[in-house]
Amino acid sequence: MMRRTMTMAALGAVAAMTLAACGSDDGGEVADVSASDFEAGTTMAALAEAGTITIGTKFDQPLFGLKPPSGDPVGFDVEIGKIIAGELGISTDDINWVETVSANREPFIQDGTVDMVIATYTINDTRKELISFAGPYYNAGQSLMVLSDNDEINGPDDLAGQRVCSVEGSTPAQNIADNYPDATLSLFGAYTDCLEPLRNGQVDVVTTDNVILAGYVDESDGAFKIAGEPFTEEPYGIGVEREDTEFRMWINDVLEEIFEDGRWLDAWNETAGTVLPEATPPSVDRYEVS
């Protein structure tokens, strides 16, 4: 977001001078670049000059974006953010992580609270009216999670009369409301708010993307399981300001580069790939903003 980062340039320039040319403190790669390596007036030049970037991500989703009691968030989305920052010459220590839940991702991009959002963020036409997406960088699919002894729910066709928990402002919640109206839908601010209601029987099923649910199943000590197969396609994108075509296309360039050079797969295998099967990077969609 140029209007926010430009105001930080003077302060950030001091921080930028302290960046290591070939690595960050945690071993992440940092490109040897400066603002002059980017076209003047672009978000890339402003961020490189500032030496800092603000990235919105989830703090409650194991494998993709989870913030421990102390320290910065970890997960696949976080690693993708570190790579993009590194290509701007920004070290991990100079990333400001901001929690974004499903309902505030577009507002945070629009008002300049964050420079980008990487937060299991499904690309869809409705959101494209408000912000713009680079990517996709991963293809997920909506699934269902139930108690491990629940054999009644094996897919979305079994949801009639069931109490379904999801998150306000999310694509999965909207899909249930639109296509499975016989289910009783309860909405919360974060997916972690659904876990205890599922555990104690207040709801029958939690729905979101399969990769998110896989993390909760992995941490549940056998209490939860995935019911059936994914029943939608959810391409994850990186949200930026709607009119910032230069920044979006530059991020697309970075994504295509890491798809090819192995950094994307390394990030996957070190995070979500510890639980989920080996993944294949998708094809970037360089759509035009109408």
Image (cartoon, helix red, strand yellow):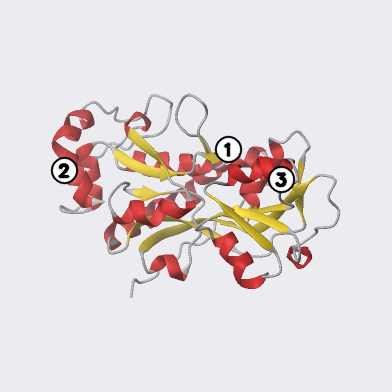
The percent coordinates of residue 136 (x first, y second) are 48, 59
Front residue of this view, candidates 184 and 7: 184
Question: Can you name the residue that lies furthest to the front here?
Answer: 202
Which amino acid type is shown beneath numbered disc 1? Thr
Residue at 70%, 64% in the rendered image: 183
98 horizontally vs 7: left or right: right
Which residue is disc 2 drawn over?
7
Residue at 61%, 54% in the rendered image: 166
Q: Is residue 186 visible?
A: yes
Q: Is residue 278 visible?
A: no
Which residue is disc 1 drawn over?
271
Frontmost of labels 1 and 2 is 2
Which amino acid type is shown beneath numbered disc 2? Thr
Q: How many marks?
A: 3
Neighbours of disc 2 within 10 Å: few (<14), some (14-19), many (20+): few
Q: CA distance from mark 1 to mark 3?
A: 26 Å
- Of the numbered discs 1 and 3, the one sitting upstream in the chain is 3
The percent coordinates of residue 38 (x first, y second) are 21, 50
**Disc marking residue 198:** 3
Per the image, label 3 sits on a secondary structure element best described as helix
Q: CA distance from mark 1 to mark 2?
A: 34 Å
Per the image, label 1 sits on a secondary structure element best described as loop
Q: Are marks 1 and 3 in contact (CB under 8 Å)?
A: no
